[in-house]
């Protein structure tokens, strides 16, 4: 096995996350200590804190990385694409991670939902993500038409509605233990709530 010194920083973080998640699932989040996580990886508690500020940060890092992936997906979308379609395309990031049984993201989500403090922290991140998405969609509208005055209120509402569709689809498919249908369920909900065209100018 490679020594920690030979691994990249992200590889070490990934190894810590894998060890932590295994312990969280086996023992429970609150029952697992930082010392135990560090011992499994073969490092000291002090070394652990060089990579993560807390054990909560270990769990929530996956969401942060998915958010960055989502922004990258948005940047790759055509500027003339309706905002609703861009949001649906971006949500494929979450679909890919949650619908695949071979990925650890579903187990991580189970850990988050079992711990009120973790769930609250994730919801706060989701709120920030929504705000950032609305701002980026407004910037795309201006890049599409420099004379445009995007309605930021409507954009925020659209982003919120899109996330409500995502949440409904996730809960429906995962509760039915049918994650392979997540994409189809998300398509169904977003078609039902689809707005018309691009965002309009502020009133």
Image (cartoon, rainbow, N blue to C red):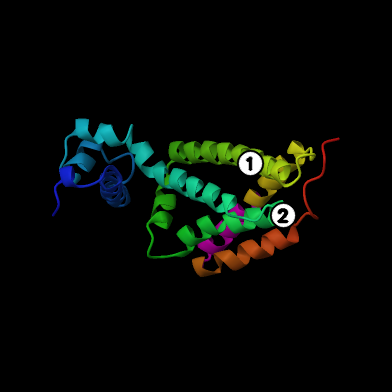
Residue 131 lies, in percent from the top left, at: 62, 37
Q: What secondary structure is the magenta-colored segment mainly?
A: helix
Picture residue at 58% right of the left edge, 65% below the top: 183
Quarter-wise, where is residue 92 in the image?
bottom right
Q: Residue furthest front?
A: 146
Q: Quadrant of the N terminus?
A: bottom left
Does the stretch in magenta take in 172?
A: yes
Nearest the viewer among 2 and 169 is: 2
Upstream in the sequence, badge 1 or badge 2? Answer: 2
Q: Which residue is mark 1?
A: 136
For label 1, the SS is helix
- Picture disc at residue 80: 2
The answer to which of 3 and 169 lies nearer the viewer is 3
> At which x and y percent is residue 150?
76, 40
**Magenta stretch?**
164-178
Q: Is residue 177 visible?
A: no
């Amino acid at each position: 096995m490679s020594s920690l010194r030979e691994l990249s920083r992200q590889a070490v973080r990934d190894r810590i996350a894998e060890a932590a998640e295994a312990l969280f699932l086996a023992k429970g989040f609150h029952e697992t200590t930082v010392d135990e996580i560090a011992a499994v990886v073969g490092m000291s508690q002090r070394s652990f804190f060089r990579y993560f500020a807390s054990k909560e940060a270990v769990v929530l890092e996956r969401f942060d990385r998915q958010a960055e992936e989502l922004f990258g997906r948005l940047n790759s979308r055509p500027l003339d694409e309706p905002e609703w379609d861009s949001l649906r395309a971006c949500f494929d990031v979450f679909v890919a991670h949650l619908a695949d049984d071979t990925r650890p993201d579903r187990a991580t989500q189970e850990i988050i939902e079992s711990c009120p403090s973790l769930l609250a922290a994730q919801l706060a991140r989701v709120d920030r993500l929504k705000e950032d998405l609305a701002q980026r969609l407004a910037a795309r509208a201006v890049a599409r038409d420099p004379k445009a005055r995007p309605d930021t209120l409507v954009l925020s509402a659209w982003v919120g509605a899109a996330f409500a569709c995502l949440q409904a689809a996730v809960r429906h498919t995962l509760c039915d233990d049918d994650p392979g249908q997540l994409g189809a369920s998300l398509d169904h909900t977003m078609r039902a709530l689809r707005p018309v065209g691009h965002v309009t100018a502020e009133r």
